[in-house]
Image: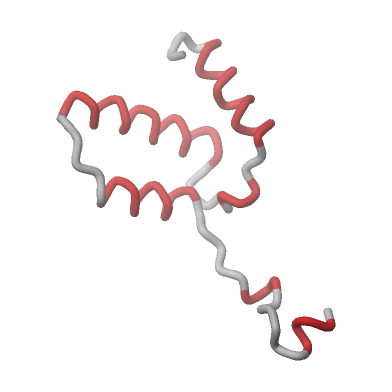
Amino acid sequence: GKLVGVGLVPSRAAARTVTLGSMLKAFFEQTDVKPSTLVRMEQARRALESHFGTDRDVASITESDADGWRAGLKTDGYA
């Protein structure tokens, strides 16, 4: 677009993609919680990674996607 052409905004191709796996890794590296809390959080992490995949761009996860993930947890007896 015109704004990219004059250097006012970065091109979409240059935008940094944040994957679910990298976001969760960074989050867990900074997390300081009780061991029992960490167990639950790791369960949620595995469920997220299993459902969406570690390479999924977090910006592409919609509210509807999240609702589907939560519904699956309920069906499986976790929520």
Q: Residue furthest right?
A: 2
Query: Residue 55: x, y in percent?
Result: 52, 52
Query: Residue 41: x, y in percent?
Result: 32, 31
Q: Residue furthest left?
A: 35
Residue at 53% x, 33% y: name it.
Answer: 51
Task: State how the image is colored.
Answer: secondary structure
Residue at 61% x, 51% y: name it.
Answer: 59
Location of residue 42 with respect to 11 vertically, above or below: above
Snapshot quadrant of residue 43? top left
Camera-side residue of 73 and 8: 8
Query: Residue 5: x, y in percent?
Result: 78, 88
Query: Residue 69: x, y in percent?
Result: 57, 26
Number of numbered discs on residues: 0
Q: Residue furthest bottom?
A: 6
Residue at 19% x, 42% y: name it.
Answer: 32
Q: Quadrant of the N terminus?
A: bottom right
Q: Is residue 63 left or right of residue 2?
A: left
Snapshot quadrant of residue 38? top left
Camera-side residue of 15 and 2: 2
Q: Residue furthest front?
A: 8
Residue at 39% x, 47% y: name it.
Answer: 24
Q: Is residue 78 left or right of residue 32?
A: right
Camera-side residue of 27 and 6: 6
Q: Is residue 60 left or right of residue 77?
A: right
Snapshot quadrant of residue 67? top right
Location of residue 13 with respect to 52 vertically, above or below: below
